[in-house]
Image (cartoon, grey):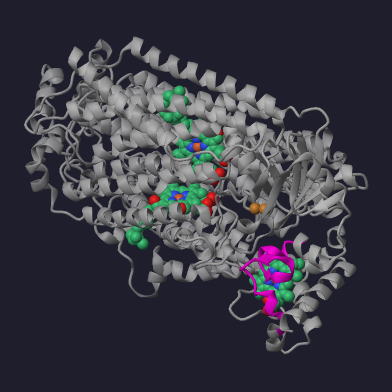
């Protein structure tokens, strides 16, 4: 970014900053607000099925792999820390730390997603097996889709990191992608708690 | 504001209120109430209408007055007075609507509570809705089934409703009572008929292509007439065995004309002409009818679109029901040609 | 990130990129590239479906409905966006390649062709929005004409029931999702940055993308008439379980809503960020025009509520194609869940369709009465109150739905409470009219017409909010009347007010005042004749969404149909009223209604923040010390700025508060760049003639430095 961004004019002329918050960061937070509401609509469906309709959870012949998913949770939570570390690194000018952190985060996210896919194929029920299966697949699947998007963003950040595009002065790309990744992580904890544990 | 102009404004407001009152009183707005609930609901309606005429005449008169009186002269370039607000006024027009709205809420809540309270020992009727027909069951009378809702006058009735497929809605305008009928749920509705007569039962929730035709009737009768009807023997057709009752029950009436079943639908082909149609299709009558019901798309009558007639009668109807239905259609068709 | 960092000094003039010659043209963003990218993505979509079904062992692997869903309704539109160039910049950025300076296409329009590109200029996007939405309005209106033709007589005339249901479903969906909501977004796109003194929206490329999603959504909904089984026919509400069992057209609704919803979320996000971070110096929240306030609250509603309709449509889609059990009782689903989720969006949506109109009305009424808006703060606060209350009333659409009975009274209370903040707005408009100097020109006619028509619609809403009455009239023509009084008499009237009001500013031309007024009166009469009797037949017992009805309503329906054709014909006047002589002469010759026509649609927005501010002060807290101080500061800064030409440091998370208003203002070279003269000091309070403007400037600004080029140029240009 720093390499070329200033060289050419890319948009409208600079605006007055009437808020201390950076526009892109604010945009990401608002986007996350609407993402939370999207999850909210899925949780509403969950509420209707489980609380209003009293569907058994999990419906008898089926089991939820709480333990495997728990390990998966741990992996995802750890990846949030590596993400944070890579951001801190670039803030201090440590490019190697940035690259390593992003790479680690990406790999952990990938492991999470693959484990989830494996879980789907082993769990023994399908989305069309009643409301329990429906909600299970749709909530975890919605989250999985977010992990997938997060991974794509991470991939792009990693490429740019290896191309040397971030610097201590200019790391919004990492910061914003990071915020999204933390959101995906926190959301998983909520999904895990509601779907698997309680 | 000068005195004269205030008088003018008030005159305009009175004129507006008079016009509003005329609109409220001249046409027959609400249908003649035929239930106790309807009477109460109409009271809320008129109560609210009064408030609305009051508010609307204020708004309309101020607008009209301002627009006429404060028109800018063509060569006038000056500004209006730089008034930014007036706390007293603002409080007033926050408080008055708040008070009116509270009054409306209280009246509505009281009426709602009264309407929801069934009288002692209500007559229970189970209502089953399906695409595009109504069935009414009377558990107190051996689960007697009827396609028409018959009710005794002056006795409180508790309708317990459910749907077999999608959301429908039960409405009798004269009763002013309405309730959506949802699959999987059993909502209830209270009605206390007060007037003998025949009123329409209308489905008011979009339920598919036959929605517009999903109608039935409710007949409010005197207590004795109702008793007589209720204890009367079920006709063979009403028990559920007869082809004509299946025809009615399955909602065929919504789409087809068939004199033998009193059906006048116009969406599908005229089934009084079945014999001719079978000939045109080049198939024996009975197997043509059966095929048309089980797999309607196998042969599509010219001029009618494919895929309109529901495809699932083959699975919805039992073997015996299907046989009865086919027998009924074939016999009526043969009668028709004779 | 891609900070819009540049200095004016280094800014180079650039038009749109020229397409290269030869086969490389195929790679150049534009319709040529979409021509091969759409089929390509369609093919990829088919491939994904076939592969997944083969891998999952499902039979058949070629399954029509899923192919349509994935390949035609998801992949192909993405291919369209990629082809037209909506993603070029981001794609390059993502892989770290150097971004081509203009690969997002330049700003502004230099010829009519530039309106068919991915253009990042907020004004061009505003125009694109308006043209597109008016097209869909006409389409949806024609469908309404067909509806009325069918209803002119009892019995079936032209269509069978399924087609009829499709007609009003598509009518309503287009009107709501492709006309009212985006038309407001388009108007706001044009004017909000100008009102804030911002150079553009915060994310211009995102802005362009959100526009280009609209034609996709609209085409999708219209195309549903072509698929087997006909258009989606479960109403614009698409209640489950009916929508789950309808023919294939329904997925066109499900996906069309997703695209339109994504578009409105992105726009709303953009507005919020713009309003929060890009206000001109001194433009505090309490000085923002009410239109900006209205868009701020609307955008909050959109960001919070819209995901819920996305969710509801996802569920229906899953129930259809994956046989899940969200709403299927057999599998343990809960059919009423759909309605709760849907209305949790769609009730706020009706305020999404009304609040921007409130903003326009405030603007027009105050300017045309030459008075500041009455009770400015309470007006803004009542918007916020409607925002908050709007989230707590969704179940008033479900009073008869069979939901938990105890929910009805609380929902009735909140529903009726909304009358209070709305009443504040209505009475404040009336008070603004009072003792004003009212110019009764076309925009004002629409605005005043709006007030009274909306009050009728709102009062019928109060009938509906009172549960006992709703039990009687729910799902009857009384509702249809309510819908049209609030949406047509409310939203549409204000959209027309806005279009007429800003037409000169947008196009540099004047509309024909006489035809404009004619348009209003014809519409006003036609509208009332069409929709008022609907109250009556509804209460008397005519249900909605029926193609056939009891013959006792025949006379009224015939009357309504005839009136509606009259109403439709009045739209022709609207189409005629806009092509008119060049403005310079016409505005001058009718000074009383002079809408300055300064900013042409092409070229860049002005950044005359000091001027914007001066204007706002007059409308809000002109007399306060604080405002004067801010204004002095802004003007002084401008001086500094011109002298120093400093650059903003790039890429800090917390930027220091910008000391200089200046970089926004009157920089030589920019005002002259715009296709026309820069807007005058009071960019937006347009009703005044030249004299009054000069006087005004004398009143509040005479002791201070005279404006520099941008301003004088603007004034002279008029
Ligand atoms: C622009 C869109 C818009 C707006 C602004 C409104 C505003 C309101 N609406 Fe409406 N509504 C719709 C669009 C809108 N609606 C649509 C599209 C439907 C149908 C959906 C469908 O099923 O297809 C619908 C349906 C609908 C229903 C469901 C009916 C049913 O299906 O059974 C209800 C019920 O409560 C309702 C109520 C209200 C109320 C109380 C307001 C209030 O906000 C109105 C407030 C305004 C005023 C009251 C007037 C001004 C106030 C004063 C002058 C102050 C003094 C007033 C008093 C003291 C009363 N609306
Ligand atoms: C912004 C919203 C909006 C607008 C502007 C309109 C505008 C119109 N609407 Fe619509 N309508 C809705 C939103 C809207 N509607 C909604 C939400 C529903 C509920 C749907 C549901 O139940 O799911 C509905 C339902 C609805 C129904 C009820 C259908 C039913 O329940 O069975 C009817 C019936 O009369 C109707 C009629 C009209 C008419 C005549 C117009 C007219 O004002 C249109 C005028 C415009 C034009 C005609 C177009 C341009 C004209 C020309 C191009 C010139 C040539 C024209 C000719 C004269 C032929 N509408
Ligand atoms: Cu049943 Cu409409
Ligand atoms: Cu609502």
Residue A23 in percent (x, y) is at: 44, 34
Q: Is residue C611 above or below residue C513?
A: above
> C604 or B64, which is in the foreground?
B64
Q: Residue most toward the right? A: A61
The image shows a total of numbered marks equal to: 0
Q: In the rendered view of the protein, which quadrant contains the C terminus of chain A?
A: top right
Q: Quadrant of residue C405?
A: top right
Q: Give the image quarter of residue A43.
A: top right
- Is B120 a magenta residue? no
Q: Is residue C636 visible?
A: yes
Q: Which contiguous range is marked in magenta? A: B250-275
**Residue C337 position within the rendered picture, expressed as x and y whole percent measured from the top left:** 69, 41
- Residue at the front extreme, as displayed: B224
Above or below residue C558? Residue B284 is: below
Task: Please tell me which residue lies in front, B304 or C277.
Answer: B304
Q: Is residue A3 visible?
A: no
Taking the image as shown, residue A108 lies to the left or right of residue B88, namely right
Q: Residue at x 78, y 33 (%)?
A: A193
Does B265 appear in magenta?
A: yes
Q: Is C253 left, or right, of B221 in this rendering?
A: left
Q: Nearer the viewer, residue B317 or C500?
A: B317
C661 shown above or below C50:
above
- The one nearer the camera, C241 or C260, is C241
Quadrant the N terminus of chain A occupies: top left
Residue A80: % across, % down? 67, 35
**Which x, y percent locates residue A27?**
49, 36
Write the residue at 87% across / 66% down: B318
Name the image quarter holding residue C110: bottom left
Residue located at (42% from left, 41% from top) = C485
């Amino acid at each position: 970014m720093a390499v070329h961004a200033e060289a050419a004019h890319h948009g409208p002329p600079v605006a007055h900053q009437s808020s201390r918050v950076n526009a892109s960061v604010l945009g990401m937070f608002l986007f996350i607000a609407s993402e939370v509401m999207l999850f909210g609509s899925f949780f509403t469906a969950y509420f209707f099925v489980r609380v209003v309709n009293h569907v058994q959870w999990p419906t008898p012949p089926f089991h939820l792999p709480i333990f495997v998913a728990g390990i998966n949770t741990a992996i995802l939570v750890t990846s949030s820390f590596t993400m944070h570390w890579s951001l801190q690194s670039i803030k201090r000018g440590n490019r190697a730390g940035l690259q390593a952190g992003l790479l680690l985060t990406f790999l952990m996210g990938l492991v999470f997603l693959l484990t989830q896919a494996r879980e789907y194929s082993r769990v023994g029920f399908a989305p069309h097996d009643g409301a329990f299966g429906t909600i299970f697949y749709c909530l975890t699947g919605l989250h999985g889709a977010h992990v997938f998007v997060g991974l794509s963003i991470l991939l792009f950040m990693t490429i740019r990191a290896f191309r040397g595009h971030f610097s201590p002065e200019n790391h919004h790309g990492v910061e914003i992608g990071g915020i999204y990744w933390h959101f995906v992580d926190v959301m998983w904890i909520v999904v895990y708690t509601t779907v698997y544990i309680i | 504001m000068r005195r004269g102009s205030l008088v003018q404004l008030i005159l305009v407001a009175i004129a507006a209120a008079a016009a509003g009152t005329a609109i409220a009183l001249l046409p027959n707005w609400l249908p003649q109430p035929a239930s106790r609930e309807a009477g109460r609901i109409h009271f809320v309606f008129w109560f609210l209408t009064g408030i609305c005429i009051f508010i609307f005449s204020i708004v309309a008169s101020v607008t009209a007055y301002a627009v006429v009186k404060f028109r800018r002269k063509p060569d006038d370039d000056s500004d209006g007075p730089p008034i930014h607000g007036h706390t007293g006024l603002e409080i007033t027009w926050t408080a008055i609507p708040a008070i009116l709205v509270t009054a409306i809420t209280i009246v509505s809540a009281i009426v709602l509570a009264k309407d929801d309270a069934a009288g002692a020992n209500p007559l229970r009727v189970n209502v089953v809705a399906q695409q595009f027909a109504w069935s009414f069951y009377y558990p107190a009378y051996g689960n007697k089934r009827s396609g028409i809702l018959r009710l005794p006058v002056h006795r409180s009735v508790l309708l317990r409703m459910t749907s077999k497929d999608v959301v429908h809605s039960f409405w009798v305008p004269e009763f002013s009572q309405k309730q959506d009928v949802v699959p999987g749920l059993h909502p209830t509705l209270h009605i206390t008929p007060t007037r003998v007569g025949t009123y329409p039962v209308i489905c008011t929730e979009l339920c598919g292509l036959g929605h517009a035709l999903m109608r039935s009737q409710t007949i409010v009768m005197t207590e004795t007439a109702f008793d007589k009807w209720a204890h009367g023997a079920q006709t063979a057709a009403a028990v559920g065995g007869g082809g004509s009752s299946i025809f009615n029950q399955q909602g065929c009436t919504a789409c087809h004309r068939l004199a033998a079943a009193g059906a006048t639908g116009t969406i599908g082909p005229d089934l009084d002409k079945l014999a001719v149609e079978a000939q045109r299709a080049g198939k024996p009558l009975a197997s043509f009818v059966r095929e048309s019901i089980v797999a309607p798309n196998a042969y599509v009558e010219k001029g009618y679109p494919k895929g309109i007639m529901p495809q699932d009668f083959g699975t919805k109807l039992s073997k015996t029901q299907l046989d009865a239905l086919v027998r009924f259609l074939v016999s009526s068709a043969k009668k028709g040609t004779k | 990130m891609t900070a819009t960092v540049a200095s004016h000094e280094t800014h180079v003039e650039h038009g749109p990129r020229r397409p290269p010659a030869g086969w490389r043209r195929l790679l150049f963003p534009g319709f040529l590239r979409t021509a091969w990218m759409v089929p390509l993505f369609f093919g990829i979509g088919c491939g994904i479906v076939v592969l997944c079904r083969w891998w999952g062992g499902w039979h058949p692997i070629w399954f029509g409905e899923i192919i349509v869903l994935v390949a035609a309704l998801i992949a192909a539109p993405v291919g369209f966006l990629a082809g037209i160039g909506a993603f070029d910049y981001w794609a390059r950025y993502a892989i770290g390649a150097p971004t081509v300076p203009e690969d997002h296409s330049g700003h502004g329009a230099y010829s009519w062709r530039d309106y068919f590109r991915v253009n990042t200029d907020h004004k061009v996007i505003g125009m694109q929005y308006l043209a597109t939405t008016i097209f869909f309005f006409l389409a949806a209106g024609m469908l309404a004409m067909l509806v009325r033709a069918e209803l002119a007589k009892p019995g079936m005339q032209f269509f069978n029931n399924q087609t009829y249901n499709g007609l009003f479903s598509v009518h309503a969906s287009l009107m709501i999702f492709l006309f009212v909501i985006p038309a407001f977004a388009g108007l706001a796109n044009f004017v909000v940055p100008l009102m804030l003194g911002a150079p553009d929206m915060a994310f211009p490329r995102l802005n362009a993308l959100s526009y280009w999603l609209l034609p996709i959504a609209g085409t999708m909904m219209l195309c549903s008439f072509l698929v087997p089984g006909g258009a989606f026919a479960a109403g614009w509400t698409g209640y489950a379980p009916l929508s789950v069992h309808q023919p294939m057209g329904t997925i066109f609704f499900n996906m069309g809503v997703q695209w339109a919803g994504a578009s409105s979320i992105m726009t709303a996000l953009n507005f919020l960020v713009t309003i929060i971070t890009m206000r001109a110096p001194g433009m505090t929240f309490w000085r923002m025009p009410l239109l900006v306030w209205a868009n701020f609250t609307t955008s909050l509603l959109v960001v919070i509520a819209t995901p819920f309709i996305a969710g509801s449509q996802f569920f229906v889609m899953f129930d259809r194609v994956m046989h899940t059990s969200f709403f299927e009782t057999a599998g343990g689903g809960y059919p009423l869940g759909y309605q709760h989720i849907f209305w949790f969006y769609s009730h706020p949506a009706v305020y999404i369709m009304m609040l921007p109109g409130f903003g326009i009305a405030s603007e027009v009424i105050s300017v045309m009465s030459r008075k500041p808006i009455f009770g400015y703060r309470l007006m803004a606060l009542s918007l916020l109150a409607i925002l908050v209350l709007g989230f707590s009333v969704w179940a008033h659409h479900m009073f008869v739905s069979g939901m938990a009975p105890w929910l009805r009274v609380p929902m009735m209370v909140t529903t009726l409470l909304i009358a209070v903040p709305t009443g504040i707005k209505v009475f404040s408009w009336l008070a603004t009219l009072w003792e004003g100097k009212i110019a009764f020109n076309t925009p004002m006619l629409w605005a005043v017409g709006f007030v009274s028509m909306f009050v009728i619609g709102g009062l019928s809403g109060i009938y509906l909010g009172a549960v006992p009455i709703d039990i009687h009239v729910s799902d009857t023509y009384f509702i249809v009347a309510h819908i049209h009084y609030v949406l047509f008499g409310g939203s549409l009237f204000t959209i027309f007010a806005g279009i007429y009001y800003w037409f000169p500013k947008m196009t540099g031309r004047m509309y024909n005042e006489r035809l404009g007024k004619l348009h209003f009166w014809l519409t006003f009469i036609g509208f009332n004749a069409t929709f008022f009797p609907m109250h009556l037949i509804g209460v008397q017992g005519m249900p909605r969404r029926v193609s056939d009805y009891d013959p006792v309503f025949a006379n009224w329906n015939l009357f309504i149909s005839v009136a509606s054709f009259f109403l439709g014909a009045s739209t022709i006047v609207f189409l005629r009223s806009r092509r008119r002589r060049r403005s310079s002469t016409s505005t001058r010759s009718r000074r009383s209604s002079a809408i300055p026509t300064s900013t042409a649609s092409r070229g860049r927005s002005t950044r005359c923040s000091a001027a914007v501010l001066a204007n706002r002060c007059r409308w809000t807290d002109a007399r306060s010390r604080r405002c004067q101080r801010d204004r002095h500061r802004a003007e002084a800064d401008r001086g500094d700025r011109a002298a120093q030409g400093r650059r903003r440091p790039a890429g800090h998370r917390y930027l220091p508060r910008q000391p200089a208003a200046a970089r926004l203002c009157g920089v030589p070279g920019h005002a002259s760049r715009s296709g026309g003269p820069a807007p005058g000091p009071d960019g937006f309070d347009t009703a005044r003639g030249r004299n009054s403007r000069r006087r005004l400037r004398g009143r509040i600004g005479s002791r201070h430095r005279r404006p520099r080029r941008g301003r004088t140029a603007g004034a002279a240009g008029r």
